[in-house]
Image (tube, grey):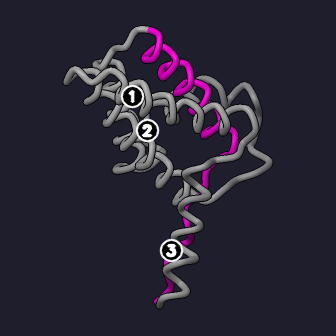
Amino acid sequence: MTSSPARTVDVRGPRFAAWVTSAVLAAVLLTASGWLAAAQAAVFAVGAAAGLRHAPYAVLYRTLVAPRLGPAREREPEAPVRFAQLVGLVFAAVGAAGYLLGAPLLGALATGSALVAALLNAATGFCLGCELYLTVRRARARTA
């Protein structure tokens, strides 16, 4: 019995998604909109739960952007990126809750943290959530 190969993604897709996410999170900070933060949390939830091929920004990338760029020259495992979506979901949900429940400082801190991570990924390709995934995985391997 063989295990199925790990799913991979075009590295440009998550960076595109990080740019879009950065724009949305910046808009959240500018407007203090808990509903917009909740919408971004929903986007993260789809990517984390259903996989990146179903994530809204990935669909946008795959249908509108990727065909104009040509084939991917580099791919990366999907699992760390999905984990990063889960981390983003937590921060966006806390941000939304803060804004919607009358704690705008909490909303701004959570949203600002997510924005920093998204901008770092978008601008440099360094994914904090992916690195956290690898750190957790190494720690689990040591304790097993």
* Residue 127 placement (x, y as % from top left): 63, 47
Q: Left of 9 or right of it: where is 49?
A: left
Q: Amino acid at mark 2?
A: Ala
Badge 2 marks a residue whose secondary structure is: loop
Badge 1 marks a residue whose secondary structure is: helix
Q: Which residue is mark 1?
A: 40
Label 3 neighbourhood size at 10 Å, few (<14), some (14-19), many (20+)? few
Q: Which residue is mark 2?
A: 55
- Disc 3 and disc 1: Cα gap in Å? 31 Å
Which of labels 3 and 1 is toward the front? 1
**Residue at 60% over, 23% down:** 64
- Disc 3 and disc 2: Cα gap in Å? 22 Å
**Residue at 54% over, 30% down:** 115
Q: Which residue is mark 3?
A: 4
Which of labels 2 and 1 is toward the front? 1
Give the magenta part as a residue range.
1-30
Q: Left of 7 or right of it: where is 56?
A: left
